[in-house]
Image (spheres, rainbow, N blue to C red):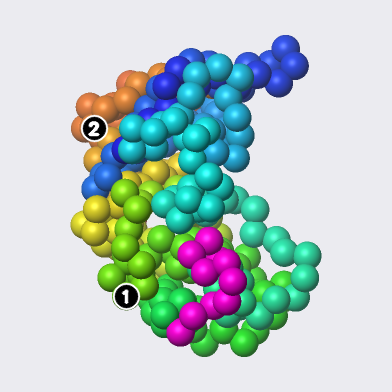
Amino acid sequence: MIEGHDLRIERGRKVLLRDVSCQVRPGEILAVMGPNGAGKSTLLKCLTGSLAPSAGHVSIDGQDQRAVSARDLAQRRAVLSQSRELAFPFPVADVVMMGRHPHSPGAITPADRDIAQAVMQRTGVWDLRHEDYTVLSGGEKQRVQLARTLTQIWPEAHKAHAPRKGHSYIFLDEPTAALDLKFQQMIFTLAHELKAAGLGIMMILHEPYHARQHADQVLLLKAGQRYAMGTPDAVLGDDVLCDLFDLTVPLSLNGPMA
C-alpha cells in the first residue's frame, strides 16, 4: 500500500495541501475528484515522490518512501502526468521504451521489446510506432504516454522478465483527457485488468459517473483539504457534489458508459 500521512504542501504563504491522508491499496482503484485548484495533482506528486511535503510523509508497502532509491521506486510505481510534450522528435516506439529504462538501465533486452510491443498493441499505438511523437495529435500523445506508463509496470513483465519487488502501482492524472469514447473505454478496461492483477491504481477524474462505475474508493478534495472519502455510493450523492463543486443544479450520475 502507498499511504500518505497528514500531507501538507506550502508555497510561500499559500497552503496547497492541508493535512491530507489517503491510501492507494493493491487490487483497488482510488478515484480522486474535486474542483480546479483543489490539490489533486499536488497530492499525486506527493504520493509518487516527485514533490516533497512540507509536513507529513509517504510510505510504500510499509517503508518510508524517502528511504527508497529512485530506481527502485521507478520499478514499483509509474505515473501518467498531464504534461505530454517532448523537446526532441523521438519515434513513438522509443518514447514507449522509456518505460523499461528503470528495469534495464544498461541495454534494452528482447524481453523489454516484447513487453513494449504487447503494450503498444493493447493501447492502439502499434501502427504509430515509427511516427515522430511531436507531430501526433493530443489524443495520440496521450495514448503513447499511457503506453509508456504501462510498459513501466506491465504485470506480464514480472513473469517474463523479472520478479516483482513488492506491489506495483500506477497513477493516472486525468487519463481520459483528449480521448474519444472508444479510448476512454479502453482506459477503464485496462484499469480493471491491472486491478485484477493486484496493482494499486489512483486516477484523477472529473466525471462522477466514471468514479461511480469504476472506483472502489473515492477521495474528494476541496481547497487543499480532504472533503470526504469512501465508497462511490457513500460520497457521490447530489448534496455532496453540489457543495463540492458549488453547483446549483445536481449532476446526472448516469452519464455515457465507458
- Contact flag, marks 1 and 2 (Cβ < 8 Å): no
Q: Which residue is mark 2?
A: 231
Residue type (three-letter) at the residue carrying disc 2: Thr
Asked whether the viewer can see residue 173, the reply is: no
The magenta span reads 101-110
Work out whether 258 lies above or below 97: above
Asked whether the viewer can see residue 125, the reply is: yes
Count of numbered marks: 2
Residue 230, x across and y down, in percent: 26, 27
Q: Which residue is mark 1?
A: 160
Residue 18, x across and y down, in percent: 53, 16
Quadrant for the C terminus, please: bottom left
- 181 or 6: nearer the eye? 6
- 103 or 230: nearer the eye? 103
Is residue 107 rendered magenta in the image?
yes
Give the residue drawn at x 52%, y 69%.
104
Taken as a whole, is the magenta stretch helix, strand or loop?
A: loop
Q: Residues within 10 Å of mark 1 (few under 14, many from 20)?
A: few
Work out whether 2 lies above or below 75: above
Residue 205: image quadrant is top left
Residue type (three-letter) at the residue carrying disc 1: Ala
Q: Residues within 10 Å of mark 2 (few under 14, many from 20)?
A: some
Tell me which label, 1 or 2, sits earlier in the chain: 1
Q: CA distance from mark 1 to mark 2?
A: 35 Å
Residue 93: image quadrant is bottom right
Q: Is residue 243 left or right of residue 14?
A: left
Q: Is residue 255 left or right of residue 144?
A: left
Is residue 224 rendered magenta in the image?
no
